[in-house]
Amino acid sequence: MARGQQKLQSQAKAAEKMAKQKKQQGHNANEQKKAALKALVFVCTVCKAQMPDPKTYKQHFENKHPKNELPDELKNVCP
């Protein structure tokens, strides 16, 4: 068990290490969020939902908006 100065040094070192880890985790989460938002390229013309690819967009449109006519950009997309 550490005592006195050794204990204070150990606590300071541990606190510094934790702060470094916390800062790094927050940075990675922000990068992941930005990358995910960049990947959402297609926007539904009816409800403004965002999708990553045209196939998903077509499935969304057929399931959520069956009464609406399929947009021109989705008519040639394979199911």
Image: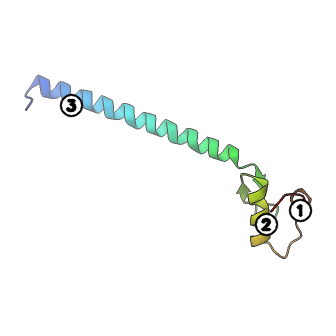
Helix, strand or loop at mark 2:
helix
> Which x, y percent locates residue 15?
28, 32
Which quadrant, please, contains the C terminus?
A: bottom right
Going by the numbered disc 3, the residue's amino acid type is Gln
Q: Earlier in the sequence, mark 2 or mark 1?
A: 2
Going by the numbered disc 2, the residue's amino acid type is Phe
Mark seen at residue 71: 1
Kindly indicate the quadrant of the structure image that contains residue 19.
Answer: top left
- Label 2 sits on residue: 61
Q: Disc 2 and disc 1: Cα gap in Å?
A: 9 Å
- Label 3 sits on residue: 11
Residue 67, compared with residue 9, is above or below; it is below
Going by the numbered disc 1, the residue's amino acid type is Pro
Look at 51% across and 42% down and name the residue there: 29
Helix, strand or loop at mark 3:
helix
Look at 63% across and 46% down and name the residue there: 36
